[in-house]
Image (tube, rainbow, N blue to C red):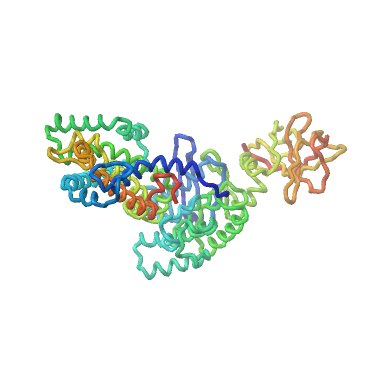
């Protein structure tokens, strides 16, 4: 193998990461306005962002909703994926396709639909459960996709071998199926969590009165105070994302998201 | 008194794609290794999986040692199975893989440890007990799969083409190991393969299968030397097969290669098989004229294909490597019909 500089990869990385770099640089501004390139250097905006209760309340709501959506989406997605890859039933192909349907619908329409369902059918005001439901409508197919890919790539002879060795169905599931699906489950969780955490279009319809998720609060904040605290908040989220990504990479949970590209 | 240990009666499994089994009756003796031999899609793997309990038959019964186990799940059958892909659990170590079947049986820890040690010793892998399957060579993985299957003291050891994914050299080595091990343990085995060599080397008896049915069962050498059915002779490449054109009542059989005296074989004779070494090639008569169409050189033999001028029949003859022939050469074929093997259709 020749060791040439991978110019194409570098270019793609630069194009993808340049906006992030701008945001991070902006968060380090010393002045009162979010400008790029930054004027002076200070970490003040980080303490400003972390001292803002609106941000923190919104962060808490976003986190709760993302965790709940992720757990529900992964459990439902795993059960559905298990059925789709381990059983044969009438309408199997159709169910696989329709299960991914929500991914083809604009999220704003998903948000509206769930709002209509909650408000008109259930006669309920928007609430945290409604918000979680809305996120799950897209979260389940995202999770399902990754988990199906993981489980379909497993050799079913593994489960059959465990069976011939005397293992009950439950034991086969617990000792073979689940451990082998775990990297896929972690990868799927990551995707669903990120989707839910930074979603705006569905959240707009379903947020409980008086409360907002972090992306919405940040967007609204920008409208009336364009100071660098918003960039500082973004930088913190990027850092958090990178840490999670790094940890998952180390435990090998990302292979199912990238084929086998990451090692 | 019957000596059969495994007894299959009227087993039928229909699949949409036609790869099922049809009305299989089979007796397997205690301690013997029975090879199921046939082309892909002949139903041999389906039959094995039906014995294992991984496939449910539409009808028929599976008996082991007098017990009807047809309705038992695979987990309750006490069968050791070695899969074509070996199916080692990739997240467990070699020792944990071998321990799996013992743990489901809730044996004491000390017993499990001892049994794992013995099983790994048996397949000469004790030194690799703590490795993961992914760190082993194909041959080593195959031996782990075997150890995992035999450590549970199975009533029957089922092997589904366990060597087909290996290099030729390792395959030869492992198949004699496998044979020795099976005989030492005295375990009853069923071995599925499409490889003639494996069938010869491993089987006490070989059942030839085609289109979901057992064509014939015999000791391997018997099968290769004296196949009784056209399919067997064809599949094992036992020689040149020619149809019998007609026979006189109680008299000679007529074939395109000449007529032969009535054979003492029972039943109708549809064709005869002439071994390649019973066919001589003469450059200048006598014999049936033909043309050399192909020369197939192997390590120790030369197989010459000759097309007969009149009938167009393709005849195969074994010749010493030193014989100098060329493609397109006119030649005369002399078949020793005394050595012809009669075949039913």
Direction from residue B153 to residue B197 in the image, left or right = right
Quadrant in the picture for the C terminus of chain B? top right
The one nearer the camera, A143 or A95, is A143
Mark yes or no: residue A173 visible.
no
Counting from the top left corner in percent of width and height, residue B27 is at 50, 50
The one nearer the camera, B19 or A221, is A221
Give above or below for A145 relative to B246. Answer: below
**Residue shown at 69% from the left, 38% from the top:** B241
Mark yes or no: residue A171 visible.
yes
Counting from the top left corner in percent of width and height, residue B312 is at 74, 30
Count of labels in the image:
0
Residue ranking furthest to the right: B284
Q: Residue B56 is drawn in which quadrant? A: top left
Give above or below for B14 relative to A46. Answer: above
The one nearer the camera, B89 or B19, is B89
Counting from the top left corner in percent of width and height, residue B70 is at 39, 48
The one nearer the camera, B254 or B162, is B162
Q: Residue B248 is drawn in which quadrant? A: top right
Direction from residue B292 to residue A220 in the image, left or right = left
Q: Residue B92 is drawn in which quadrant? A: bottom left
Counting from the top left corner in percent of width and height, residue B120 is at 48, 65
Direction from residue B173 to residue A72 in the image, left or right = left
**Residue shown at 44% from the left, 66% from the top:** B116
């Amino acid at each position: 193998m020749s060791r040439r500089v991978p110019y194409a990869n570098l270019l793609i990385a630069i194009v993808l990461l340049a906006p992030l770099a701008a945001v991070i640089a902006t968060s380090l501004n010393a002045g009162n306005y979010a400008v790029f390139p930054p004027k002076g250097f200070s970490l003040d905006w980080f303490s400003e962002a972390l001292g803002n209760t609106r941000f923190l309340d919104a962060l808490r709501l976003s986190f709760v909703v993302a965790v709940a959506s992720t757990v529900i989406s992964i459990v439902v997605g795993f059960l559905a994926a298990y059925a789709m890859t381990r059983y044969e039933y009438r309408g199997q192909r159709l169910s696989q396709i329709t299960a991914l349907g929500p991914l083809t619908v604009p999220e704003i329409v998903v948000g509206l639909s769930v709002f209509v369902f909650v408000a008109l059918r259930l006669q309920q005001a928007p609430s945290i459960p409604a918000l979680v439901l809305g996120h799950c409508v897209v979260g389940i197919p995202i999770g399902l996709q990754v988990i199906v890919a993981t489980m379909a790539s497993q050799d079913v002879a593994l489960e059959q071998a465990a069976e011939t060795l005397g293992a009950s169905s439950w034991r086969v599931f617990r000792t073979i199926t689940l451990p082998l699906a775990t990297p896929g489950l972690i990868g799927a969780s990551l995707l669903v969590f990120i989707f839910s955490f930074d979603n705006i279009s569905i959240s707009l319809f379903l947020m409980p009165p008086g409360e907002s998720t972090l992306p919405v609060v940040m967007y609204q904040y920008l409208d009336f105070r364009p100071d660098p605290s918003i960039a500082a908040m973004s930088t913190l989220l990027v850092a958090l994302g990178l840490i999670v990504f790094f940890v998952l990479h180390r435990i090998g949970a990302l292979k199912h998201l990238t084929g086998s590209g990451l090692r | 008194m019957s000596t059969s240990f495994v007894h299959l009666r009227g087993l039928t499994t229909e699949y949409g794609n036609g790869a099922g089994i049809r009305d299989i009756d089979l007796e397997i003796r205690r301690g013997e290794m029975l090879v199921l031999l046939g082309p892909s899609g002949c139903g041999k793997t389906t039959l094995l999986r039906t014995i294992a309990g991984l496939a449910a038959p539409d009808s028929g019964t599976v008996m082991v040692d007098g017990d009807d186990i047809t309705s038992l799940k695979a987990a309750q059958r006490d069968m050791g199975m070695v899969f074509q892909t070996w199916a080692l659990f990739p997240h467990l170590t070699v020792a944990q893989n071998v321990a799996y079947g013992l743990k489901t049986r809730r044996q004491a820890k000390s017993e499990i440890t001892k049994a794992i040690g013995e099983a790994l010793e048996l397949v000469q892998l004790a030194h690799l007990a703590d490795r993961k399957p992914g760190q082993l060579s194909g041959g080593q993985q195959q031996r782990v799969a075997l150890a995992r299957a035999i450590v549970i003291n199975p009533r029957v050891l089922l092997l589904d083409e366990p060597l087909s994914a290996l290099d030729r050299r390792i395959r030869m080595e492992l198949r004699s190991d496998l044979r020795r091990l099976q005989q030492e343990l005295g375990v009853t085995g069923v071995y599925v393969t499409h490889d003639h060599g494996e069938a010869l080397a491993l089987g006490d008896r070989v059942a030839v299968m085609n289109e979901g049915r057992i064509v014939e069962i015999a000791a391997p050498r018997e099968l290769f030397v004296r196949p009784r059915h056209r399919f067997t002779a064809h599949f094992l490449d036992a020689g040149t097969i020619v149809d019998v054109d007609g026979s006189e009542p109680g008299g000679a059989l007529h074939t395109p290669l000449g007529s032969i005296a009535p054979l003492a074989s029972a039943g109708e004779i549809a064709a005869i098989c002439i071994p390649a070494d019973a066919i001589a090639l003469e450059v200048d008569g006598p014999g049936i004229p033909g043309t050399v169409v192909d020369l197939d050189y192997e390590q120790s033999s030369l197989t010459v294909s000759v097309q007969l001028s009149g009938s167009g029949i393709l005849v195969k003859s074994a010749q010493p490597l030193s014989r100098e022939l060329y493609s397109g050469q006119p030649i005369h074929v002399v078949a020793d019909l005394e050595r012809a093997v009669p075949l039913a259709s």
